[in-house]
Every structure is written in C-alpha cells, then in structure tokens.
Amino acid sequence: MKTLLTLFVLLFSSTVVADDISDFEIEGMSLGDSALDYFSEEEIKNNLQNYYNDKTYSVAEIEFLPSFKVYDAIQIHFKTLDRNYVIHSISGFIDYPNNIHECYDKKNEIYDEIIFLFQNMQNDEYESPHEADKSGKSLVSVSRFFNDEVAIRVICTDWTKEIGYLDTLRVTIDRIELLKWINDKAYK
C-alpha cells in the first residue's frame, strides 16, 4: 500500500478523485504549460527529434536531468511555430533493462491508480507487435484512458534482443488533437 501511495504522489501530484485528466502532471509538467518553465530554449532546440514528415508539431526528448525525480527521460510535443513551446503532449520514460516483468508490475500499479482517480473516463487495454520491429517479436502492452480532449496511455515496450533497445515504461498525456495529427498527417 505504501508503494501505491508513493507512486500516486510522485506521478500524479493529485490528492482527490478527479474527472479532468488535463490536470495530470509528469515531473510537475501539465498539458498547456510552457516548456520554457522547465527547460531553456537551448535545451529544447538541442534535443529536437526528426520523426515526422509534416512539421505542424515538433518533439524534443530530454534525458537524465538531475531535476527528474521519477523518470529517466521526458518527451514533449509542441506546435513548431509556437515560441512559447506550449506542451500538447508529455511522456515520461523509465528504463527496465532486461526486466520487462518489473515494467509490467509498475504499469499495473499505475493502471490501478488511474482507474481510482478517473472513474468516469473511458479506458481500454491491448497488446500488439511494435510497428518499428519488422519481425513482429517486440511487443507493446497499453492501458489507455481518454475523453474527447485528452488521453493518458501507460505502455510497456518489450524489445527483442535483436533490436537492441532497452525495455521501457512510458506514461503519456496527449491532447486528442495531437493524436489525430499523428495518425492522419505526421508521416505523410
């Protein structure tokens, strides 16, 4: 029980049952915050990733900062032309090298907390091959909570040894608008 309470305080910074998942925080950051409140513009620009063909949104990944209390890395999405770097998606990553079972245990703990906090949200769970692994052997296990505006996903990725990536837990808060862009335009 102590572990669940600690996890609750560290990950979610909320003390009551909530209905609005847009208030959810990762490392103190929420959707709608300016990334400049947490990182310098130079840190953001130096950590930009080039994942998408469409440039409506940009993504930065920042790793292993001393200010990170829970996660090993943070990923943020913001509109490319927005000089305030308003966050539209934020993800926290925890590495689980060669220990996917511990990742699944932590995912289940987080799932239980989210179910408690957001009892009125739609949710589902699924497992599928990771699209980046053409062999189909790397797997993602996803718990998803959502409404018309925001989604929370808790994901364990179990990479094969051939791929060479570390297994990870990922907790993500996304605006639905961003997810639609990723599905419909980002890779075109």
Image (spheres, helix red, strand yellow):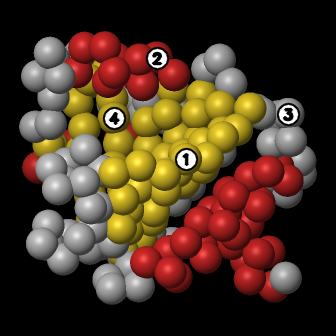
Total marks drawn?
4
Q: CA distance from mark 4 to mark 2?
A: 12 Å
In the rendered image, which residue does mark 3 sit on? 120
Mark 3 neighbour density, 10 Å: few (under 14) some (14–19) many (20 or more): some
Of the numbered discs 1 and 3, the one sitting upstream in the chain is: 3
Residue at image location 32% in from the left, 83% down from the top = 97
- Front disc: 4 or 3: 3
Of the numbered discs 1 and 2, the one sitting upstream in the chain is: 1
Q: Is residue 82 visible?
A: no
Front in this rendered view, residue 134 or 79 = 134
Amino acid, disc 1: Tyr
- Front disc: 4 or 1: 1
**Residue 109: percent from left, percent from top:** 69, 69
- Front disc: 1 or 2: 1
Of the numbered discs 4 and 2, the one sitting upstream in the chain is: 4
Identify the image quadrant of the C terminus. top left
In the rendered image, which residue does mark 2 sit on? 177
